[in-house]
Amino acid sequence: MLDQAGGPPIADLSHAWLSDAILAPDRRFVATVGGGRLALWTLDGERLGRCWAGPSDRFLAVSPDGTRLVTGSRHPGAVSIVDTAGSTHLERHVCERKTSASSAAFSSDGRRLLVVWSTEAWLLDGRTGERIASVDGLSDPAQGALSSDGSVIVVSDGVLRAWRVP
């Protein structure tokens, strides 16, 4: 626990839409999702002028270099990759499933991305969103993890299973 005698918090995002939040690895921004919005904030609580409306109310994952965010929605299970570094702020819609997306994780080099839905998990190219491999037939709710090198998928739906991937 932090001692409040050490000073005030360095950030107060009480005005942010908040279902989930994640800090960029280089601490350049905090990303928040909630209320159908994705926003980037500085640590002093100022919005960076980047705000997207859309299916962004479930979870966030940030690439190791902080240039890409993955955001997901409960309904209808949409997942998108958002470019945080480019001036155009591209949003690439990866896919839309009938079940809700529950989590996402990048490999430590950012080349691979695991996205888990209620009944399946996909290993994607972390830059393009192209599918590399998938696991089907999971039970709801499923959660997943990706090894740091992106070569092993671990999924739990009440039973923990691991797969090596190409």
Image (cartoon, grey):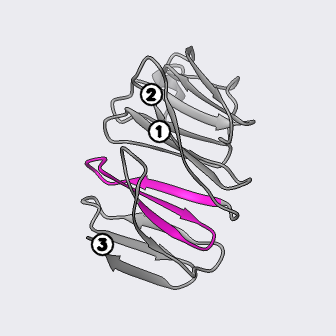
The C terminus, quarter of image: bottom left
Q: Nearer the viewer, residue 79 or 155?
A: 79
Q: Main secondary structure of the magenta part?
A: strand
Q: Does the magenta stretch include residue 132?
A: no
Residue where numbered disc 2 is placed: 84
The mark found on residue 158 in the picture is none
Residue 150 rendering spot, x and y as whole percentages: 29, 61
Cβ–Cβ under 8 Å for marks 1 and 2? yes
- Label 1 residue SS: strand
User: Along the line of sight, which residue is nearer the eye, 37 or 87?
Assistant: 87
Q: What residue type is labelled 1?
A: Leu
Which residue occupies the foreground of this view, 155 or 89?
Answer: 89
Measuring from the top left, give residue 161's x and y in whole percent: 43, 82
Look at the image and give the residue range highlighted in magenta: 101-123
Does the CB distance between marks 3 and 1 fall below 8 Å? no
Under tag 3, what secondary structure?
loop
Numbered circles on residues, count:
3
Question: In the drawing, does residue 76 fall left or right of residue 114?
Answer: right
Image quarter for residue 153?
bottom left
- Which type of secondary structure does the marked residue at label 2 adopt? loop
Residue 138, given in percent of the width and then of the height, sits at: 57, 79
Of callouts 3 and 2, the N-terminal one: 2
The amino acid pointed to by label 2 is Thr
Q: On residue 69, which mark appears? A: 1
Residue depicted at x 72% and y 54%: 76
Identify the mark nearer the N-term, 3 or 1. Answer: 1
Residue at image point 45% right, 71% down = 134
Question: Mark on residue 165?
Answer: 3
Q: Residues within 10 Å of mark 3 (few under 14, many from 20)?
A: few
